[in-house]
Structures are given as C-alpha cells and as structure tokens.
Image (spheres, grey):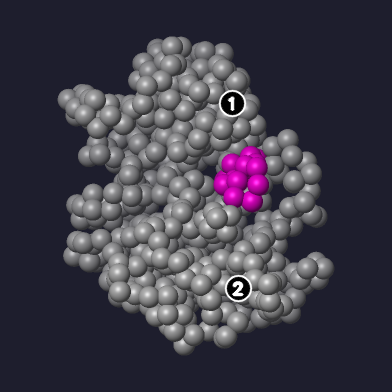
Amino acid sequence: MEKIWLNNYDSDISKEIDADKYPSLVDVFEQSTATYANTVSYINMGKSITFAELDQLSKDFAAYLQSIGLKKGDAVAIMMPNLLQYPVALFGVLRAGMTVVNVNPLYTARELQHQLNDSNSKAIVIVENFACTLSEVIADTAIEKVLLTSIGDMLPTVKKWAVNFAIKYVKKMVPSYNLPEAKPFLKALNIGASETYTRPTITGKDLAFLQYTGGTTGVSKGAMLTHRNAVANLEQVASILAPVVVPGKENVVTALPLYHIFALQANCLAFIKFGCPNLLITNPRDMPAFVKALSKYPFTIITGVNTLFNGLLNTAGFSDIDFTNVKISLAGGAAVQKSVAERWKATTGHVLLEGYGLTECSPVVTVNHPSLKIYKGSIGMPVPSTDIKLVDDDGIEVALGESGEMLVKGPQVMSGYLNREEATNDIIKDGWLATGDIARCDEDGFFYIVDRKKDMILVSGFNVYPNEIEDVTAMHPDIIEAAAVGVPHENSGEIVKVYVVSENEALTEDDVIKHCREHLTGYKVPKKVEFRNELPKSNVGKILRRELRDE
C-alpha cells in the first residue's frame, strides 16, 4: 500500500534510516561507553554502574569467553531476571563475536532442554535460583561451560553477602542442584581481567541474537536476528525517540525482563545508544516494592505491558508519585485496554503510547509518536524504512479502512528461524513477513490491531475479535481484567466466554452480561462468564488465551 503514514510523520522524525550506519551492535556500544563514560548506565537494588564500568566488565567477560576456547559465532545462553549481571553478560557475549540466546528463567526443564539443544548453546550464564532446572537436563545438551551467579553478586560486599544469604538460607529460594563443573560468574570476570581481549570483526550479517518465540502457537522457534536487524531497529526506534530524549539525561525504568525482545530493544539497546541510566526492576510482580522504587527515582521514561500498567494503577501509593518529569510511557507486547489507558492519563497526566512488534521483527514495527496528545486505540504508524500491507485470505491487498492480515517488510525483519526452512518459508514470502495479526489502517496512516488471526471467534458465521470483548468488559468499574475466548456450541459453532477478575464478590454473571449487552452487538455478547482470582499470563504479562481455551 502507499505509505500514507509518512504524510503525518512529525517533522522532526526521519522518514528513512540507514540500516548500515553501524557495522554491529558492538560499534554502537563502544561509541556510547566512550561518550558517556562517567554517566550511570544501570541501577539495581541501590547499586549503580557507569558506562565506563560496564565497558570494562563486559570486556573482561568477553576475554574470559575467548580464553576458554569458545569461538566467534558460538551460542551463549543467558538465564536471569533483571540484574546488573545481565548487561555485563549480554555485551560480553556480543563483544566476543558470539550469539546471545536469551532464556526465560521460569522455563521448565523440558522447555530449557529444547531451547539449549535447538540453539546448540555451548555455554550458559545462569542465576543459581534456577540452576536446579539446568542440572536436570545439562547432560542431554551441548553445554560445555556453566557460569553461575547469585542475585546479589554485583552489590557492595556487605550487602552482597546479606542478600545472597537471605535468598538462599532464609527465604530458601535456591533449590538444590548438581552442577559440579560450574564456575562463579564473578570469578570468570576476575580471570577475564587478566586475559587479553581480541576484538573480532563483526559484520551486519553475523547473528546477534537467537531470540525464541513464546511457543504459544506450537514449538518454540529461534528467530535469527542479525546485527544489521538489531541495528536497523535500534535506529528506527531512536529516530522516533530523538525529538524528546536528551542523551545522557533521561531516567529510564525497566520492569519488563531484558531477556524479552521488547525490553531488550526499547530499553537496553535504545538507552545504551542514548547513554541514559536504566533502573532495573528484578521482581515487578511485587507491586508495592515496585511503587516504592519508583517513588525514589525521578523517572522520565517507563515501558511496560497493559497488565503492568494496570497493576501499578491498582497499587496503593502509585497515584502519589510525582509524574512531572515523565516524557514517555510506552506500552507494547499486548493490546492496551482503553480503560487502562484512560486511567493512566487521568493518574499521571501523560498519554500511554502504544506500539506494536514481534520477535521476528527485532521487534518494533509500529509506534505512536511522543507528540500524541490523546489515546487513539491505535498501535501507531510504521517506524521509518518499514512497509506494511494488509491482505485477505487469498493474499489480495484490502481497501483502505478494511481489515486484513498485516504483512511487514523492512531491514528489521529476521533472516529466518534457525534450522527451520519450512517454517521460515511459511512466514516470509518475497521479503514480506506474515504477522498473523489482523489490522486495519485509517486515512491518516494509523494502524489498529483487530486481533490475532488464530484467536478469532466465529459465531454463526460472524467474526468476533476477543480484544473488543475484553475492552468492553474491562470498562465495568468492578472488573480488573478480562479474557475472551470462543467455546464450542452446537447451534452457533462457537459462543463467547469471558473470564473475569474482580475484587467485588457481589458482581454476578448477569451483571457482566448486562454491561456487555449495552456496548456490543448481540452475537458478540458473552454467553458465559467465569470469575477467576487471576488470569494465566506469560513472563511479560500477556494474557494467555490459549491456556483458557485448552481448559
């Protein structure tokens, strides 16, 4: 389709980017650590490290990896929550010319074994809290080296011992494990400091990340993201942020895990480039502690998913925070509900900007510009140097305003799935990546996600999209969260069932249905309502409709 969105780009945002501006992410990193050497790069549990310290520590780790015989291109897994150790390990692996394999710490043994074997990872950096999972499967993987760290390892000495002792012996959060060959991460850094680091030649074609899809639609697949993919998306994101971001001066909040592609790009890489401090939240599920941390940190930028923003809004003390300095509140990963966006604006005084992306696109595809004054319910406009078209089931492009599957083309699109040529060919055709998402585009070039193609509910031949049902349901003042799925029905094929979380015990199924009937066409109104204390979610807070359907 014609790039009509370019007509509505803010004048200070570039319409195209240079995907080859930097040969690799390592070049971006080296430039920033030199430019912002004395600026704080990361803060966690009260401890901060500067860009100069991050530069030295990651170089030490790169030297260590090279000294133990690992080669350029080898895959190294990182399995930890948001800790100071994470960026040290991440950039150490990249600087050694190796490929980062991000691993969800909450993986089961089966899931971990699959990912380590599929990626052919040679080494893993892991927090000891999850070492028991690794010990169950390591004999059946290609892992040669295990680097083991504890939660408090990067903290000052006294606090380090106190935190690690409490976690292991008081809270008993470290199940027993058997990894006799594991080497302490801190010891590896010390060894690396005495070794010589050899800066490899890294090109845009080299793999930076093997980023695994969530596996919610089948076996988890490794998206091959090259340095050029990552640099291109970094430049695309930076072009959108540049008009409002002051390099070296913003205070960023990172509550989503850095091993997730959204936080990896929008927080980690973007603000390495801009040279800004990043507050790492290790356990965002502890909302009271999260709010307490925010109250002490004059943040200007915060990212998250709908459930995270919703959780903050429902946590005591959040509304008392000073939001004067906030410039950007960015949501992605899942659809933002109108009720959450409106409450966010009312509470903070700032618009909740929504973006859209997927692992296979490094991940950002579209985003609302920071100049947006009101919530539109849109995922925004394509980032620079990105093309989008919407097609019907026959692959024919639909008319403007009509809904169709979103196809994406741009320098951020992955090179393919690792060792899965058929799956790659299924999703990428003639350079266009099929997202599996149904969207529409308005006359100004703003895109709107209608829903996931596979989540669509079919009621008597009518398409019903869960996002719409969930948005309407969540408008009820007593409903905190909602998830809609289709359940089989002998007459209509499927009917809508909605799962609801509410703190009002007096709320009934009839109340919910009556509320929905006021806002929805008859066939869209839920016929069944089930109340839950909580809804199943992924590690980044995305509601898992599939699990509800499977039940």
Please state if 532 lies on the left or on the right of 447 as rendered. left
Q: Mark 2 points at which residue?
A: 495
Q: Is mark 1 on a helix, strand or loop?
A: strand
On-image quarter of the N terminus: bottom right
Q: Is mark 2 on a helix, strand or loop?
A: strand
Mark before the other along the chain sequence, 2 or 1: 1
Q: Quick check: 539 above or below 142? A: below
Looking at the rendered structure, the number of numbered marks drawn on it comes to 2
Closer to us: mark 2 or mark 1? Answer: 2
| Mark 1: amino acid | Ser
Q: For the point 59% across and 41% down, which residue is it?
A: 212
Q: For the point 75% across and 76% down, which residue is it?
A: 398
Q: Count residues near mark 2 (Cα–Cα under 10 Å), then give few for <14, some for 14-19, many for 20+.
A: many
On-image quarter of the C terminus: bottom right
Q: For the point 52% across and 47% down, which residue is it?
A: 261
Magenta residue span: 212-232
The answer to whether residue 195 is seen in the rendering is no
The answer to whether residue 115 is seen in the rendering is yes
Circle 2/circle 1 CB separation < 8 Å: no
Q: Mark 1 points at which residue?
A: 121
Q: Position of residue 47 (x, y in %)?
A: 24, 36
